[in-house]
Image (cartoon, rainbow, N blue to C red):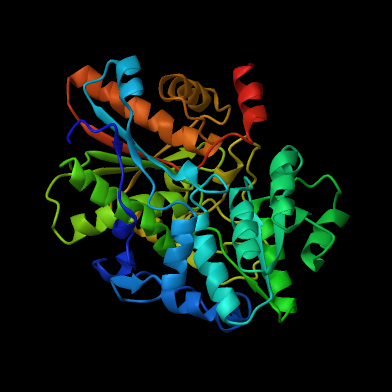
Amino acid sequence: MRDSIQITLSVDDLPKHWYNVLADLPEILPEPLNEDGRLERLGDIILQECIKQESSAERLIKIPEEVRELYLRAGRPRPLHRAVGLEKRLKTPARLYYKREDLSPTGSHKVNTALAQVYYAANAGYSRVVTETGAGQWGTAVAYAASLMNLRSTVYWVREAYEWKPERRRLMRLYGAEVLASPSEKTEYGRRLLKGGPDNKGTLGIAISEAAEDSLKNPDTTYVVGSVLNYVLLHQTIIGLEVTKQLEVVDVVPDVMIGCLGGGSNFGGFVLPMVGKVLRGEVKKKIKFLAAQSEAAPNLVKGTYQYDFPDAAQILPRIKGYSLTHEFKMPSIWAEGLRYHMAAPIISYLRDKGLVEAIAYPKDEKAVFEAARMFIQAEGFIPAPESSYAIRAMVDEALKAKATGDERVIVANISGHGFLDLEAYGKVLVI
């Protein structure tokens, strides 16, 4: 079993609980600030069930049976692959593995929390959900989840990506979503920004503000959040819980776990169950938890651990995390999902305590797309631009192992596929 190329779990192995790392942290995570009533107003913006989960101290939080059924319909559990082709290309003694989150119906890990949040929204009696999206993967996941539960959905999409991804735009609309370029004319904040110049390309912080404003003004609507907050990472631990079981099947403990990071949802969901094992002393081995970022938005690498607003309009409460500040001007990159000013509070705390490391790759993206091309030709799967950052870091770690002759176990999360991002590959690699 040690040399298994594909490690699968049965439907009976699908976790029954999400893992909450807050229960195992050595101290209480810094709480959001309640300035000008923002914390009280939060209940009018996002779901009460999610607010409850945000500060829960329970280690295991039960996944509703209806959500587990939705996970099964979405193809969970997902396989863990041994990257034998990439190992041969690199001539590395390291063993490389990658988790296939690209196999979801919409092509990314984002459905893991979209299904949960939209389920809670439907149960609470809402008829519409609203959200933001950067690369478009989250918006697609929300549109998909809403369509399954017969809710209306509105997606505020960062204009930069909205304009160059018409096929993903069509996919969201095929699921029934209203898709708007952000900043938009639909919100007061969007209209104010557009008065300053109609060519505003937007940011994730702006799109979050528009979604929050929309939710606040419409009682039939609730805002479902794509990243950063504790409960989003909680739902995403379905990934890491499966990976932990799969590594046990082949009797290995990883030396390195890698994921790309913008806000932190896929990285957190991937590593937190193993981080918990380290915190509880169940794993004695030193594990490197590595977040791969872009120099366009290196919040963990160059940010400051501070309180900051997660949105540009300052509607939401300030939270503590590594931030470049909500007013930071980020250059354009093809991996739009990584272009966010702030890292999740949980990941930021772990970074501050030295349990998480981070690396940022140049914003021209040549290094990450070259690594993706090698991966595509060796393994045959096309990763999303964001996932290419994790692949670049995995390649770099494998080359370090080659230089030292170290048989390390390196595991990466492929957070999404790149079938709707081929233009990006064409621009960077000139193919």
Q: Is residue 191 above or below residue 39?
A: above
Residue 327's x, y, as percent?
64, 54
Can you see residue 321? Answer: no
Q: Is residue 53 above or below residue 392?
A: below
Residue 230's x, y, as percent?
43, 66
Q: Is residue 265 above or below residue 217?
A: above
Number of disc labels: 0
Residue 22's x, y, as percent?
32, 68
Q: Nearer the viewer, residue 170 or 181?
A: 170
Q: Nearer the viewer, residue 196 or 209?
A: 209
Residue 35 lies in quadrant: bottom right
Who's the residue at 50% across and 33% down the image?
383
* Quarter of the figure that contains the C terminus: top right
Residue 131 lies in quadrant: bottom right
Who's the residue at 70% across and 58% down the image?
155
Residue 63's x, y, as percent?
39, 70
Who's the residue at 45% across and 51% down the image?
75
* Quarter of the figure that contains the N terminus: top left
Who's the residue at 61% across and 63% down the image?
148
Can you see residue 425? Answer: yes
Q: Nearer the viewer, residue 95 or 16?
A: 16
